[in-house]
Image (cartoon, rainbow, N blue to C red):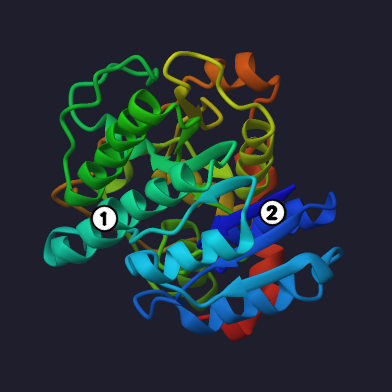
Amino acid sequence: MRVLVTGAAGFIGHHVSARLLARGDTVLGVDNLDPSGDVPLKQARLARLRTTPGAEHFTCHPVDITDAAALARIFQQERPERVVHLAARVGVRTASASARSYLDANVTGFLHVLEQAHATQVEHLVYASSSSVYGADTPPPFAESASADHPLNVYSATKRAGELLAHTYGHLHALPTSGLRFFTVYGPWGRPDMAPLRFLRALREGRPIDLYGEGRMRRDFTHVDDVAEAVLCVLDRPPSGTPPYRLLNVGRGEPVSLRDFVAVLERHVGTRAVLRPLPAQPGEMDGTWADPSALERETGFRPRVSVEEGLAQLEAWEREHPQFRT
């Protein structure tokens, strides 16, 4: 297939693109290398994609999805059969301080993607949502049938808005869409601002680890290999309902407290952490817990990489790539 992947230089986009190339698909990347992220790391991910098996079928366009005209030219020129939309402004804690940039990228940018997917008759659009849409008052484990109408931060609100826009395009234009609610993704080539790599690097360097919520918060940590596999499984199976729209959790269904997460890292690094318990920050959820049964029912796949196995892999990668330490 010809698959357009937005955010191809991002953490998940890099892994999804590599798997698509490995199985023989053509990957049409779109990424503006947004300076709000770690640009050298994004460039390294792209360089890796250009040397991976199937690299001759990879191109990447340096385009911002908020540029409607430039995005339209790419869709018209490349004529993708399917789309994986992963480009976004990410991060719960910084969203309120720069709400406009989150709305621009995550709502207006996604609207442009939907418009072009409709205009070029894309067969299936798979897009990234987030476990954070469940917000307040959702009983665990989180099921896709929950209302998800009480977001706790701007980022979550923009991702929920994207889900509603996708439903609208399915209803008005019969555009097949699948929204994937990712649960705390971690693994090699990951974002240095997220807890797994921050904790690992603080532990290795003997610095204190800030544990918000005093370490009692629980997260359904999901390895990026499982996430990439889920994306491909869903991409290959467009929804058949009326409208052709669905939401699916992508998580293991096994929440782990931050204290227990650090304890696993301690075993892999071979040193004890210096913990600094702090109050929870505004906008953060006390816990996330996926019900992955719908994903398994729709695709036959369920995330399976344990935290123990996943953190062993992350620790080995981080040790072998000291150039990305910040």
Left or right placement of residue 39 versus residue 312 in this view: left
Residue 212 shows in this picture? yes
Please state the horizontal and vertical placement of residue 147, each as a whole percent of the image. Answer: 24, 19
Residue drawn at x 30%, y 30% is 168
Residue 229's label in the rendered image is none
Residue drawn at x 13%, y 65% is 97
| Element type at mark 2 | helix
Residue drawn at x 68%, y 47% is 225
Please state the horizontal and vertical placement of residue 267, each as a whole percent of the image. Answer: 63, 53
Location of residue 190 by image quarter? bottom right
Which amino acid lies under the numbered mark 1 shown in the image of this protein?
Thr
Residue drawn at x 75%, y 75% is 50
Q: Compared to 325, does 56 lie above or below?
A: above
Residue identified by numbered label 2: 312
Residue identified by numbered label 1: 108
Left or right placement of residue 197 versus residue 96 in this view: right
Frontmost residue, 275 versus 44: 44
